[in-house]
Image (cartoon, rainbow, N blue to C red):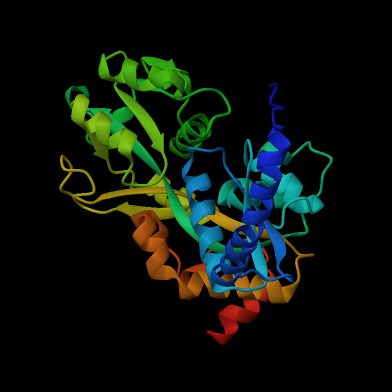
Amino acid sequence: MITKRKSARYFHTPLFFKRVPVICLILIVGACLFPFSANAFDILLGTGAPGTFSHFTGRILCRVINSHTSDMNCQIVPTSDDVYNLTNLRGGSLDIGLVDSRMLLEAVNKTGHFEFLDISYENLRALAPLYDIPITLVVRDDAGIASLTDLKGKRINAGAPQSLQYLAAETIMKAKNWSKKDFSLVEELPASHSQDTMAFCHGIMQAMLHIGVHPDSSLQQLFKLCKVNMVNMDDSDIEKLVNDHPAFWKIDIAANTYPSRPEEVTTFGTRAMLVASEDLDEETVYKIIDAIDSNQKRLSSAHPALSLYSVDTAQKSAAGIQLHPGAAKYFSEH
């Protein structure tokens, strides 16, 4: 006798309908445990590329904003550089963004990289500073460099052309009235694939510039593998530069930030600014500043560099740049 084979559909269809109530129950419970606002609107935050401190800060900042407000959904947008962020903030493709104070000032005043660009950035407004970006002079122990003046005549790496290191080297040379002829060797090695640090550790270079927050894991590794030191940059020429240029600040790197450096180091640098267009409404900006101000401990616990923010610091960090009305209102009330 031939027995007919039952189809797969005969077995699976009833099983599916048996599972429907369970699936519905899971969805209902999930909705109760993780509620969301139907009225929440997206806030796009432009940061640096993944792996940068800017990107890390943007992620923390969005978490702070989302947990502090019920009607915003902050999302990070990693970008290639500050010029991209500035241009998209100006055009409205980004709502807020992290931008270097020097780049912001140059964009608004059409100087530096922006001198010949047929784009106006006058509608950009400052919200608050998020962290310092120190320019740190790192030297080999056997180079005989104890001050910035001792750098003259040495072998240095200026960094890849148009990089932050290169711009910083140009700035220092201009402040000291130096040229490349004042050094025995000026290399232009990039940081990619550790080309600069390898040349530095092997003694080809005697000094290099590090741009970024402290403590920094890559710099910590450099201290561990090579005999290096950090040198103060606090002479009268740098002091004049900081006083004359509103994008720069005097920065102190705390003692014992690195095990091999028990003393405080005085240098200078820029600041990462939170920026928006004047078209972003006042209430939204007010809420964003309130979220930052109310979560200072959470920010500083994420990284020591994020402990910069305070209402007083924020008010003084927009030299040469107009504050957004929403930020100005918050500062006046607090």
Q: Is residue 13 above or below residue 298?
A: above
Question: Outermost residue, front direction?
Answer: 1
Question: Seen in the image, is 118 located left or right of residue 184?
Answer: right
Q: Residue at 66% across / 47% down in the picture?
A: 106
Residue 303: image location, x then y, percent = 36, 54
Question: Seen in the image, is 160 located left or right of residue 124?
Answer: left
Residue 45: image location, x then y, percent = 64, 53
Q: Would residue 103 be visible to someone looking at this image?
A: yes
Question: Outermost residue, bottom direction?
Answer: 333
Q: Residue at 39% across / 32% down in the picture?
A: 209
Q: Is residue 148 above or below residue 316?
A: above
Residue in the foreground of this view, choosing between 329 and 252: 329
**Count of all numbered marks drawn on residues in the image:** 0
Question: Outermost residue, right direction?
Answer: 118
User: Quadrant where the N terminus lies?
Assistant: top right
Residue 221: image location, x then y, percent = 26, 31
Which quadrant of the view contains residue 194? Answer: top left
Q: Residue at 42% across / 62% down in the picture?
A: 299
Question: Seen in the image, is 64 located left or right of residue 226?
Answer: right
Residue in the foreground of this view, choosing between 51 and 27: 27
Residue in the foreground of this view, choosing between 246 and 174: 246
Q: Is residue 135 above or below residue 131?
A: above
Q: Would residue 205 be visible to someone looking at this image?
A: no
Q: Residue at 62% across / 45% down in the picture?
A: 103
Which quadrant of the view contains residue 155? Answer: top left
Residue 181: image location, x then y, percent = 44, 18
